[in-house]
Amino acid sequence: MTLTTEPGERQYDPVSLAPMAFWAKSPEEREEDYAVLRAERPISWHPPAEGSMMPPQEGGGFWAVTRHEDIVAVSKDPDTFCSGEGITMEDVPPDILEAVSSFLATDAPRHTKLRKLVSAAFTPKRVKKIEDQIRDQARRLVDELIETGDCDFVAQISRRLPQWTIFEMVGVEDQESRDLATEGADGMVSWGDDEVLAGREPTELMTQSLMQLINVAVDHAEARRAEPRDDLMTNLVQAEVDGEQLTDEEIAAFFCLLSVAGNDTTRNTTSATMRALTLNPDQRTLLREDFDGRIGVAIDEFVRWATPVMTFRRTATRDVELRGSHIRQGDWVVLFYPSGNRDPEVFDDPMRFDVTRSPNPHVGFGGGGPHYCMGNQLAKTQLRAIFSEILTRVPDLEADEPVYLAGNFMQAIKSMPCRLNL
Ligand code: HEM
C-alpha cells in the first residue's frame, strides 16, 4: 500500500507505532510491523504517542523513520533535524528535559561546547584506569554469582557492572547515594510501566527520580570543589573550555545523563546477549572456541541484537522532503533504531544472531553525527569483561524467558531467571 503525502496533507499510517499496545508487544512482534513499514512506507506519519506526559497538540503526531539509510541520514544532518526541541517521542515538560538530558538535547554551538568540556574530563588516564577496574569488578561479580547459584541474572549481573562503573568513575562512593542514584536512573526510563509507576503519574515519577539524581550530583560536586580527588566529578568541577567552567546545573544534568545513558543501555545489552547466547548455542560455542579472536566483532552483534535504545527524536528545522514525504518545519521525526538494525538492505539474514557478522554497521549507538554515543568504548569494555568471565567460568549458564519493561524508549529487561548448570 502507498500513502502519498502532498505538502499540507498527511494521513496516519494504518500500522500505528503510537499506542501502548504496540510497545507491549515482544521485540519480535514489533519487528513484523517495522518490516511492513520499511518495505512499503519507510517514512510514515503517526498520531502522538499514547500516554504522553503532556497533552498532545491538535493534529499532532510524528514521522517514523524505519530504514537504516534514513536513520543515518537524519542523524548526520543536525542542521535540518535538531535535538534541542526534545529527544523523546513523547513531550516531556521543558524543566525536566533541561534538567535531565544535558547536551543530548542541545544543538551546536552549545552541544559542541558542552560535549568538548565533558570529553576533557574523560582523560585517557581515567579511561585506562576504569578499564582495569572493570575487569576486576567483572571477576568479582562472577565469583558472587557462582556462590549464589541460580538467580535473577539482571539483579545479580547485568544491573551491577554498569552501575558500579558509572559510580566508580564519577566518584560516588557511599552505598546510600549509589542506591538513590540507581533508583532515580531507573525511574527516568520507566514512565510507561504500571508496575514501576505504582499508582503515580508519569510526571510525578520523573520529578521524584530527577530530584534524587540532582541531589546526589550537587552534593558530590560541592564535596569535590572543597576537597578534590582523583575522580570524574573532580575533573568536571575543574574542567575548562575557553575559560568557562560547568555550572552546578550543567554538572547535575550531565550526571543524570550518565546515570541513565550509562546504566540501562549496557545492562539491557548484557541481558539480551545472555538470552541470545542461550537460544543460539552454536554462537556460544564459536565464541568459546576463540574468545579473544572473536569478541571484538561479536560485541557489535550484541549491541545490534539488543538495541537497548529504541527511539530518539529530532525536530525538523525547515520544510524538507524525505523519500517523498513532505516534512514541515517543527514536525517531529523519530528514529526507530531496532528497525534500522534489522534492515535487510544492510544486514544479511537480519533476524539471525551471528557473532561473526562483519561488517556490522549497526545503529545501536546512534546513526552517526554529533550525538553519537560518547560511552561506546566504555560499554564495549564492560561487555567484553563480563562475557569473558561468564564464558570461561560459567560456560553453560542459561537464561530463561525475560520480563520486559513497558515503554517506547528503552528496550529493557526487568528480570530474567538464570541457571548456572555447573
Ligand atoms: C550498549 C550500551 C550503549 C548504547 C546502546 C548507547 C546508545 C546511545 C545512543 C543511541 C545515543 C544517542 C545517539 C544519537 O542521538 O545519535 C547515545 C548517546 C550518549 N551516550 Fe550512549 N549508549 C550506551 C552506553 C553508554 C555509556 C556506558 C555511556 C557513558 C558512560 C554513554 C553515554 C552517552 C552520552 C553522554 C550520550 C550523549 C552524546 C551526545 O549527545 O553528544 N552511553 N548512546
Image (cartoon, grey):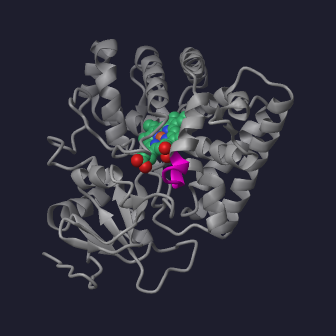
Give the image quarter of residue 387: top left
The x, y position of residue 344, in whole percent, is: 16, 48
Q: Is residue 307 left or right of residue 50?
A: left
Queried whether the magenta region covers residue 80, the answer comes back as no
Queried whether the magenta region covers residue 106, the answer comes back as yes
Q: Nearer the viewer, residue 40 or 85?
A: 85
Q: Is residue 185 left or right of residue 316?
A: right
Q: Which residue lies at the image location 71% right of the left edge and 48% below the top edge?
A: 213
The x, y position of residue 11, in whole percent, is: 27, 82
Q: Which residue lies at the image location 47% right of the left edge and 52% below the top edge?
A: 410
Report the residue that reaches farthest toward the right: 226
Q: Nearer the viewer, residue 157 or 70?
A: 70
Can residue 301 be seen by looking at this rendering? yes
Please identify the quadrant where the N terminus is shown. bottom left
The x, y position of residue 68, in whole percent, is: 24, 50
The x, y position of residue 396, in whole percent, is: 39, 23
The vertical placement of 178 against 149, above or below, is: below
Can residue 415 be seen by looking at this rendering? no
Q: Is residue 70 left or right of residue 210?
A: left
The vertical placement of 389 against 260, above or below, is: above
Q: Which residues are magenta?
A: 104-111
Give the image quarter of residue 29: bottom left
Q: Nearer the viewer, residue 24 or 127?
A: 127
